[in-house]
Image: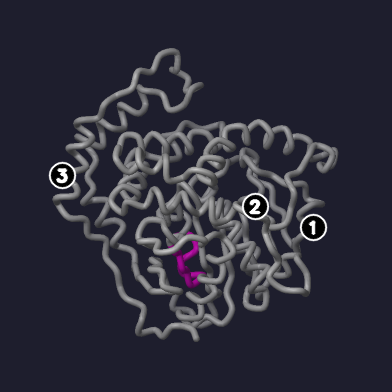
Amino acid sequence: MPPSAAQIFPFRIEVADEEIDDLLSRLARTRWAGDFANDGGQFGMPAARLRALVAYWLNGFDWRASEAELNALPHFRIELGGLPIHFIWIRSGRPEAVPLVLTHGWPWTFWDFNRLVPLLAGTFDLVVPSLPGFAFSTPLRRPGVGAPETADLWAELMSALGYARFGAVGSDWGAHVAANLAHAHADRLIGAYLTTCAIPGCRPPVAADFAENERADYERSRQRMRSARAHVLVNRDTPQTAAWALNDSPAGLLAMLVEKRLLWMGTDRDLEEVFPADFLLTTAAIYWFTGSTHSAARFYASSLRGAWTPRHARSPRLEAPIALGIFPDEPFLLPRATVEAHANLVRWQRFPRGGHYAPMEEPGPLAADINAFFHELTR
């Protein structure tokens, strides 16, 4: 039985003064590593950039101002399957509005949709959850909660909110969740818009899979995936080992979070142009104050330890309509023919610029294409 509306509780982010004081104390006592011959970041996060961000975190960043900005959104929590789930719920006030669930990835938070949400609000009813084990969807009380299980939780969540049918938008792990919704809950899903080529059941592509006019996709993806493999292996195989360090050092946590932005964002912009310091530090603070580094990383182990298994006998294909937004600097790209073989692909939209963080990098063009996709499906 789906939970009743009575089990949905308003939620506010309220970090105790003592926790802020402890964070500032740890930042002030950062034990800096040596960092020679690494000005360009060829060995990882360079010292100059990290030191500047830590100095601002310590002396300029105002968590209370960020907390107030976050709390301006309507936050809620609900218990699903024994797990606390945090979500933002913005209703359009229009009875005919399509409900959309927007799902983030790692090392993202729900705040990665902060530029996209205002462009979709008013047209859609928006539900923006934190993945299980991330941010305020904590504590994670059991293992084995990956993308397929989260898709089931989201279907239950949307039932609890009164939505019989809904659409899904996803990036990074959120795209995997949306794709699993398109398979396991296709009867309820109006459509799924993905900014990452997350198609369950696909083997990793090789050069021969790409059409002649897609060879540039293959080369870009091959180059960019070199920077993505390391964290996938760590988070899949030994996430708890890294968590001991990241949960103890805010400077170390910040280095890891910012490095992933640098590696996977579009190559034609500077970091600060896309991700202002206040955004980066708000993201790091959310991970820090919730102590969710370890449980967020476990999402990899839960999703990747073992092959994806189809949920029903009809077909392993994604039966709900799928749209793919193709951003040129996205690390993981698939050939169109491969996607068409595994999914009900109805939209394949190429964008001229942007990388892995499309909702932050290209919110305007992305919002326009999401609107066009769901308009076509519901007109």
Residue drawn at the location 55% of the way across and 42% of the way down: 232
Going by the image, does 93 lie left or right of 229? left
Q: CA distance from mark 3 to mark 2?
A: 42 Å
- For mark 3, give the secondary structure: helix
Task: Give the residue pinned by disc 3.
Answer: 21
Residue drawn at the location 72% of the way across and 73% of the way down: 312
Residue 340 numbered tag: 1
| Quadrant (top left, top right, bottom left, bottom right) of the C terminus | bottom right
Q: Residues within 10 Å of mark 2 (few under 14, many from 20)?
A: many
Task: Verify whether residue 96 appears in magenta.
Answer: no
Residue 335 percent location from the top left of the image: 77, 47
Residue 248 occupies which quadrant of the picture?
top left
Residue 22 percent location from the top left of the image: 18, 43
- For mark 2, give the secondary structure: strand
Q: CA distance from mark 3 to mark 1?
A: 53 Å
Residue 117 occupies which quadrant of the picture?
bottom left
Q: For the residue marked with disc 2, what is the amino acid?
A: Gly
Q: Residues within 10 Å of mark 1 (few under 14, many from 20)?
A: some
Q: For the residue marked with disc 3, what is the amino acid?
A: Asp
Marks 1 and 2 close (CB-CB < 8 Å)? no
Residue drawn at the location 63% of the way across and 36% of the way down: 225
- Look at the image and give the residue range highlighted in magenta: 118-129
Going by the image, does 119 lie left or right of 291? right
Task: Give the residue pinned by disc 2.
Answer: 325
Q: Residues within 10 Å of mark 3 (few under 14, many from 20)?
A: few
Give whichever of discs 1 and 2 has the lower sequence position: 2
Tag nearer the camera, 3 or 1:
3
Residue 327 percent location from the top left of the image: 63, 44
Q: CA distance from mark 1 to mark 2?
A: 14 Å
